[in-house]
Image (cartoon, rainbow, N blue to C red):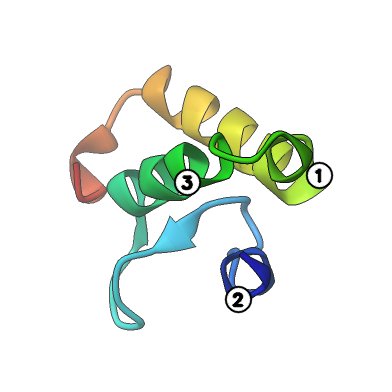
């Protein structure tokens, strides 16, 4: 979990690979893993990731993201 939290992108999401856009799927996977531990689920990085994913899902033009 420490590695996961330390590798969050500036916009709150995580990436699939270094040479790609931030990845909704990787972010959702990180959120699923964090949900297994109540303390981690309330970590500010996880909250920021959840808000970033929510905002992205509500935007137009999501096709640039790996879904």
Provide the residue designation for mark 2: 3
Q: Nearer the viewer, mark 3 or mark 1?
A: 3
Residue 15 image-quadrant placement: bottom left
In the foreground, 15 or 21? 15
Circle 3: element type = helix
In the image as oriented, which residue stretches furthest toward the bottom? 18
Q: Is residue 62 above or below residue 60?
A: below
Q: Does residue 42 appear left or right of residue 15 in this picture?
A: right
Measured in 3D between alpha carbons, the distance from the residue under mark 3 to the one under mark 2, in whole angstroms, is 12 Å
64, above or below 53, in the image: below
Q: Element at badge 1?
A: helix
Tell me if label 3 and label 2 are in contact, CB under 8 Å.
Answer: no
Near-viewer residue (55 or 30): 30
Q: Earlier in the sequence, mark 1 or mark 2?
A: 2
Mark 1 or mark 3, which is nearer the start of the sequence?
Answer: 3
Percent across and percent down for residue 59 are 40, 23
- Indicate which label's residue lies in the foreground, 1 or 2: 2
| 53 is higher (above) or lower (below) than 2 | above
Look at the image and tell me in which quarter the C terminus lies: top left
Q: Mark 1 highlights which residue?
A: 44
Q: Which residue is mark 3?
A: 33
Residue 48: where, in percent of width, then height? 70, 40
Q: Residue shown at 47%/50% (left/top)?
A: 30
Q: How many marks?
A: 3
Q: Quadrant of residue 37?
A: top right
Report x, y in % for residue 38: 71, 33
Query: Given contact means CB atoms under 8 Å apart, are the residues at marks 3 and 1 in contact?
Result: no
Query: Badge 2: how crowded within 10 Å, few (<14), some, or many (20+)?
Result: few
Residue at x 56%, y 34% (from the top left corner): 35
> In the orientation shown, which residue stands out farthest toward the top?
58
Residue drawn at x 57%, y 44% as measured from the top left: 34
Considering the image in quadrants, where does the N terminus appear? Answer: bottom right
């Amino acid at each position: 979990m420490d590695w996961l939290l330390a590798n969050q992108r500036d916009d709150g999401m995580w990436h699939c690979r270094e040479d790609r856009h931030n990845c909704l799927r990787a972010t959702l996977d990180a959120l699923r893993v964090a949900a297994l531990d109540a303390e981690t689920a309330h970590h500010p990085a996880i909250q920021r990731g959840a808000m970033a994913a929510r905002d992205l899902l509500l935007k137009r033009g999501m096709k640039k993201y790996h879904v």
